[in-house]
Image: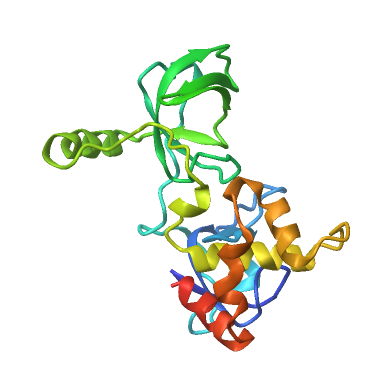
Amino acid sequence: MKVICKKGNTKLVKGFVYDADYFDNTINPNSRWQRQTIRIRGFGSYLCKNFTDTSGNPLPQIVYNNPQAPQPEPRFEISELKKNDIIVCKSDRFKYLVKGGKYRVSEIRNISNWSAEIKLEGYNRWIRFTTWAFRKLSLQESRDLALSQIFNQPENFSVEFVRKFDKETNKTKVLIQSLAKSILDPYRHGCDLIDWTIEKSKYQGFKREDFQEILDKPLSEILSEFENSLN
């Protein structure tokens, strides 16, 4: 359901249209603590009174669930993790692991309810497994993967020791985002912008020559390329 924001804040803009994944705008006269809340896709939860429908009317006093809302990740108990499981990296803060990449667990130790230590196929180093950094494949993903391994070219689940930047599919976006973060950083320690970007983004493995192409372009062209890279 599309809704219009009536009151802007640090994340939302007044008058803009957003996707509502859920809201409960019902009123229970017997509850002192009930709050009518709405969940805006990609932005979090807010009060229903600060939104209208696309015609400008107050939201109906119902419980609404958007059938097109992204499904939450299935709950996973770390204690169930085992050798040969395929896991997906959720973090962009590893030097050789790619966010969204699939890897096979080769060893596991020190399992608890909150974390475990794992080794990945092709990588002889212990890594801490947590649910913010990794996830297991869903049942459907596991089925699709099994079929793909049979009928298509089998995937490689080993860690590859190449620059993370070389594996990026949208290099322009990565370069400009990294530069922007360095521009806003007041603590450059006397480094020039490129050197500081390389220092602050070590996990990407940047080299100065990676930036040369965009540095030779006018700002308007760089901004246009960045806008296009988001599509």
Closer to the camera in the image, 222 or 191: 191
Instruction: Quarter of the image for the C terminus: give it.
Output: bottom left
- Figure disc tally: 0
**Is residue 71 found left or right of 24 in the rendered image?**
left
Q: Quadrant of residue 147?
A: top left
Closer to the camera in the image, 152 or 81: 152
- Determine the residue positioned at 46% across, 77% down: 228
On the question of residue 52 being in view, the answer is no
Rendered image coloring scheme: rainbow
Instruction: Quarter of the image for the N terminus: give it.
Output: bottom left
- Determine the residue positioned at 44% across, 40% down: 73
Q: Relative to residue 51, is residue 68 depicted above or below?
A: above
* Residue placed furthest toward the front: 209
On the question of residue 214 being in view, the answer is yes
Closer to the camera in the image, 40 or 153: 153
- Determine the residue positioned at 36% across, 34% down: 137
| Residue 70 x %, y % | 41, 53
Q: Relative to residue 209, is residue 124 depicted above or below?
A: above
Closer to the camera in the image, 200 or 55: 200
* Residue placed furthest toward the top: 110
- Determine the residue positioned at 49% across, 16% down: 79
**Is residue 228 found left or right of 175 in the rendered image?**
left
| Residue 100 x %, y % | 44, 45
| Residue 167 x %, y % | 44, 51
